[in-house]
Image (cartoon, grey):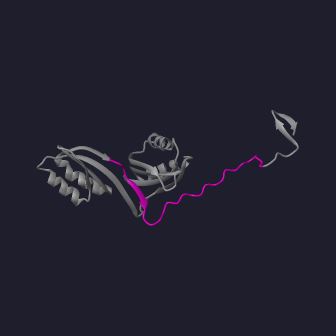
Amino acid sequence: MSQKHIISALVENHSGVLARVSTLISGRGFNIDSLAVGETHDPTVSRMTIVMVGDDRVCEQMIKQLNKLVDVIKVEDFRGQDIIDRELMIAKVQASAETRSDIMQIVNTFRAKIVDVTGESLTVEVTGNESKIDAILELLDPFGLQEVVRTGMVAMSRGRALKTPKKKPIPMSGVQSGKAKKGTAKAGGKKVKN
């Protein structure tokens, strides 16, 4: 049975990582609802929040594929966990002199903000979980939605932090530190004295 899955991935923060992750996702034909990415408290690490629809098998397959990417540090499926999730939406609503007060009442009820006013429209900003965003959109729709922008969900588990594993030092096999040993070494297939 298809259901919504929220996956959090800590990735290295450098160019090309988002492209590799999105190529993996699209190449496998996974259905993604949203993908939000941003820097964490560590500037070398970014967090991706991926919201996808599919059965448990599809979700597990995607997590396995993500874990294979070199730039991915850690992946966590939030299924069954107590999480905090938020989304930001900005909506431009058609507003006449007669409808302005009704729109403002809806905005106040949802603890949203009016961030821009023109003679013909009001621009509303609202932050909350997906059901709150969907509910305010449903109430504003009859007034005439002119434009809607949504960020996609960001999420984290309650109480417990998704820790970044310590990076292991890269083994320097075959490389010696300090001065080179006296003796012989191979160069181009020939033994050379140093």
| Residue 30 occupies quadrant | top left
Comparing 26 with 157, the one in front is 157
User: Residue 149: x percent and y percent?
Assistant: 31, 46
Residue beneath the point at 48% across and 52% down: 9
Q: Is residue 189 above or below residue 127?
A: above
Residue beneath the point at 31% across and 50% down: 89
Which residue is most to the left? 98
Specify the segment rendered in magenta.
150-177
Comparing 99 with 36, the one in front is 99
Comparing 190 with 123, the one in front is 123
Which quadrant of the figure contains the C terminus? Answer: top right
User: Residue 122: x percent and y percent?
Assistant: 21, 48
User: Residue 152: x percent and y percent?
Assistant: 36, 50
| Residue 86 occupies quadrant | bottom left
The main secondary structure of the magenta stretch is: loop
Q: Check residue 170 for magenta coloring.
A: yes
Question: Relative to residue 13, is residue 131 drawn left or right?
Answer: left
Q: Check residue 155 for magenta coloring.
A: yes
Question: Relative to residue 178, is residue 37 drawn left or right?
Answer: left
Residue beneath the point at 48% across and 54% down: 40
Question: Relative to residue 22, is residue 89 drawn left or right?
Answer: left
Comparing 3 with 125, the one in front is 125
Residue beneath the point at 28% across and 45% down: 148
User: Residue 105: x percent and y percent?
Assistant: 18, 57
